[in-house]
Amino acid sequence: MGKKGKMSRAEKNEAMWGLLFVAPTMIGLFVLNFYPIVYTIYQSFCKTGDFGRGNVFVGLSNYEGVLTSSEFWGSLVNTVKYALIEVPFGIALGLLLAVFLNRKIAFRSGYRTIFFLPMVAAPAAVAMVWKFLYNQQFGLLNNLFGLNIAWISDSNIAWISIGVIGVWSIVGYNMILFLSGLQEIPHDYYEAAMIDGASGIQQFFHVTVPLLSATTFFILQTRIIGALQVFDLIYMVMDTTNQALSSVQSVVYLFYKYAFTNGNRGYGAAIVVCMLVFIMAITFLLQRAEKKWVYYD
């Protein structure tokens, strides 16, 4: 930097090349993230014109329709119910698997791979397998245990069945994150606990759980956000003719139905914006609680 605060020729060249290198990323963020958000908010104040042409400004009409719709609130309840199954059970099972597979056992890498496979499996393949398992007439679950349960057609249990698939799909991802956290815990803590006479269970609750609180909080926050945006699982497992669809459809599924099936993109955009506000409120509360929940060693 020059005496008067001016950049030298070399510094200008360095800054120019730096901007050129980050330009593709910045353009991608704008095109794929920032612009769609702004345009969606704009569309939420509009109604699609005749024959799908243009947008007609209607003010808060779409938001009034959404917030007074029993269908929207029912979908929000369904989404929260799904999150209440997927998030806590996915975290608990992921932690238990991580603790078990962090030990020196035979075929440890193979077990890790098997549990992580659902994360890399194609969603369509996952849906086909679970629809076969849940089939009331020739499904594996009913035939294996001699049952006659409509797992995804009974509105009383369909949301639980969908939640089970969600847990199965995400537990491997949670396990990998917990494994990375476990490997960062110094072994000295466990040696000190053993010297003090702590059992394996006591070590788990008084050493492992507190020192994994940062990892647990990260998984909790990201999985709540992910679970509240569930769509593909419901879309591929539940047929449109399924009588239990209304009891499991999520907010994002409702958005898809109005925006792309019914062609009412303004109303669909209002649904998405309302859901965005809800997720932001949950995230804000979690961030406020972080200092009380998370232990940094």
Image (cartoon, rainbow, N blue to C red):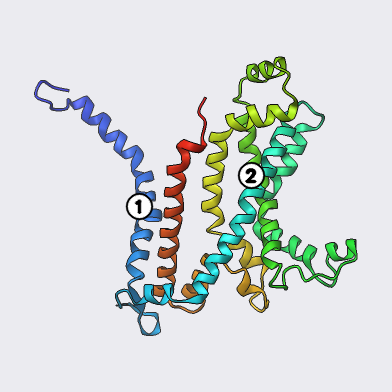
Question: As displayed, is residue 11 above or below residue 141?
Answer: above
Q: Position of residue 195 (x, y in %)?
A: 71, 14
Query: For residue 278, what is the image quadrant?
Result: bottom left
User: What amino acid does circle 1 point to?
Assistant: Phe
Q: Nearer the viewer, residue 175 or 20?
A: 175
Q: Which residue is mark 2?
A: 91
From where the camera sits, is residue 153 visible? yes
Q: Is residue 193 left or right of residue 108?
A: left
Q: Secondary structure at mark 2?
A: helix
Q: Nearer the viewer, residue 270 or 214?
A: 214
Q: Is residue 93 left or right of residue 107?
A: left
Check residue 30 in the rendering and tell me which mark sits there, or answer none. 1
User: What amino acid does circle 2 point to?
Assistant: Ile
Quadrant (top left, top right, bottom left, bottom right) of the N terminus: top left
Q: Earlier in the sequence, mark 2 or mark 1?
A: 1
Q: Nearer the viewer, residue 90 or 50?
A: 90
Check residue 148 in the rendering and tell me which mark sits there, or answer none. none
Q: Position of residue 246 (x, y in %)?
A: 61, 74
